[in-house]
Image (spheres, helix red, strand yellow):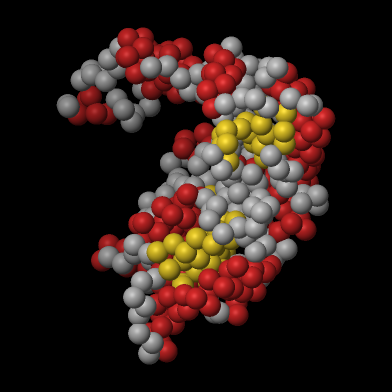
């Protein structure tokens, strides 16, 4: 590549003015579109046929590249903020958050250290302090925004194990034959993933008939495995059903045994902002660490998970990376986000949430979350009234799981595919204890009761 060729990527040229204008125009149009298409995936062969070869030595130009994205690639991606996207856990960023995500990239901000991104880190920390106060953590609690709940849970558990190791060394106790983490048998898959990465053992504790992990069962596991347990994980809203574990009882059991208490609230912990659900999370204030994903129920764009520590210094001791070129950062007391999780380079992914909260105020968030909770109760009542349906479990939060009487797995699959093919909705089949079912994950404030009843009617 010649100097002239490389310079055209970075200098303010007419070509780059045109590219920026086109991209920003498209972004504005998409952000302000009142009725975005749901869209659906295409096969690899079809995308290759339609898009052709886009990477070459000379490039195809910004206009053509954007056209390929707008007309071929984007329509092959399901729109996660569509009000009828009810599968998995939807993402429904506010307009302010989505718009400000553009600013984060356009401003070339780095969010790994205070030295390089003090203003961005300050804003992120304001959000983290607000969340910590909402969850009842003490003054001084803090943490970092990471990529998602999986990385957040892993980072918290690494800090928990390092803390347990340090305590054992100070006490002169021998290391256990194998470190263990106690969690629900229905804990999120990211806990098992973290255990594999850390090469530790999972002690899966059975839940009660209502799907809840409770303190007495955790107490038994802790008594059995003793000093080999370095952390107990409770779930603040399971992904499949939205069940909140007995946080208070589990937290008390962990405290009696001197074990780190972590709450995985990636999906459900945001419900604490609503007065309708706050009581369900009694005991979360006991947590030594917790996670909540703003890209789920706090209306931020992908990807953002808030990881909070009761004592951030324990997170810093576990995660700070040391190298000669990093000494200028690590030899200060500055709050550098890279020190609090299993990462180094990071974008200030908490800024879109900060901008949205600052723009609209927390009350708007409380109202939106409360609306989802109440909508879940409304559609659950309608499901119970219809003889062709069975409600699998009363919703605690905003996940509603139900069965269509007489349907097998293939029936659910055909129905789900038809809904997407006809651009009605995106509702994937689920299952519980081997029985197939359907599931509404209601997080988008634009989802209505009419949307949900329309989908129920399609199962007739």
Query: Residue 368 appears at what percent x and percent y?
Result: 75, 39
Q: Is residue 270 above or below residue 337?
A: above
Count every numbered label the image shows and give the total. 0
Task: Report if residue 101 is visible in the image.
Answer: yes
In the rendered structure, the answer to whether residue 336 lies left or right of residue 237 reads left
In the rendered structure, the answer to whether residue 164 lies left or right of residue 197 reads right
Q: Quadrant of residue 417?
A: top right
Query: Residue 15 appears at what percent x and percent y?
Result: 36, 18
Position of the N terminus by quadrant: top left
Q: Quadrant of residue 415?
A: top right
Position of the C terminus by quadrant: top right
Query: Residue 379 appears at what percent x and percent y?
Result: 77, 32
Residue drawn at the location 67% of the way across and 27% of the way down: 404
Frontmost residue, 172 versus 270: 172
In the rendered structure, the answer to whether residue 443 lies left or right of residue 186 reads right
Residue drawn at the location 71% of the way across and 43% of the way down: 393
Q: Quick one: which residue is furthest to the left in this view?
A: 2
């Amino acid at each position: 590549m010649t100097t002239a060729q490389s310079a055209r990527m970075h200098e303010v040229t007419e070509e780059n003015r045109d590219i920026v204008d086109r991209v920003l125009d498209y972004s504005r149009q998409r952000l302000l579109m009142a009725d975005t298409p749901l869209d659906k995936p295409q096969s690899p062969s079809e995308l290759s046929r339609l898009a052709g070869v886009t990477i070459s030595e000379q490039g195809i130009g910004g206009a053509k590249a954007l056209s390929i994205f707008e007309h071929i690639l984007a329509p092959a991606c399901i729109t996660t903020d569509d009000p009828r996207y009810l599968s998995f856990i939807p993402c429904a960023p506010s307009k302010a958050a989505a718009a400000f995500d553009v600013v984060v990239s356009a401003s070339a901000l780095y969010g790994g250290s205070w030295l390089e991104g003090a203003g961005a880190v300050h804003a992120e920390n304001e959000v983290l302090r607000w969340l910590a106060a909402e969850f009842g953590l003490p003054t001084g609690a803090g943490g970092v925004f990471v990529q998602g709940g999986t990385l957040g849970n892993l980072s918290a558990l690494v800090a928990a194990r390092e803390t347990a190791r340090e305590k054992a060394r100070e006490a002169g106790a021998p290391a256990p034959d194998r470190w263990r983490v106690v969690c629900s048998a229905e804990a999120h898959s990211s806990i098992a993933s973290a255990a594999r990465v850390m090469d530790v053992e999972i002690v899966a504790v059975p839940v009660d008939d209502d799907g809840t992990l409770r303190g007495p069962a955790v107490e038994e596991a802790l008594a059995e495995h003793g000093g080999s347990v370095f952390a107990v994980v409770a779930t603040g809203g399971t992904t499949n059903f939205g069940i909140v574990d007995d946080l208070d009882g589990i937290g008390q059991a962990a405290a009696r045994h001197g074990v780190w208490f972590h709450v995985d609230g990636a999906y459900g912990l945001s419900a604490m902002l609503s007065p309708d659900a706050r009581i369900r999370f009694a005991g979360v204030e006991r947590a030594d660490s917790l996670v909540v994903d703003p890209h789920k129920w706090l209306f931020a764009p992908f990807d953002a998970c808030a990881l909070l520590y009761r004592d951030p210094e324990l997170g810093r001791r576990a995660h700070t990376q040391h190298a000669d070129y990093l000494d200028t950062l690590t030899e200060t007391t500055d709050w550098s986000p890279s020190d609090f999780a299993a990462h180094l380079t990071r974008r200030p992914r908490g800024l879109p949430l900060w901008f949205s909260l600052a723009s609209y105020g927390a009350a708007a968030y409380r109202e939106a979350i409360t609306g989802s909770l109440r909508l879940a109760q409304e559609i659950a009542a309608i499901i119970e009234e219809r003889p062709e349906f069975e409600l699998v479990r009363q919703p605690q939060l905003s996940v509603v799981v139900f069965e269509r009487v007489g349907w097998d797995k293939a029936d659910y699959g055909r129905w789900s595919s038809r809904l997407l093919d006809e651009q009605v909705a995106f509702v994937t089949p689920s299952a519980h204890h081997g029985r197939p079912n359907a599931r509404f994950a209601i997080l988008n404030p634009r989802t209505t009761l009419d949307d949900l009843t329309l989908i129920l009617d399609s199962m007739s």
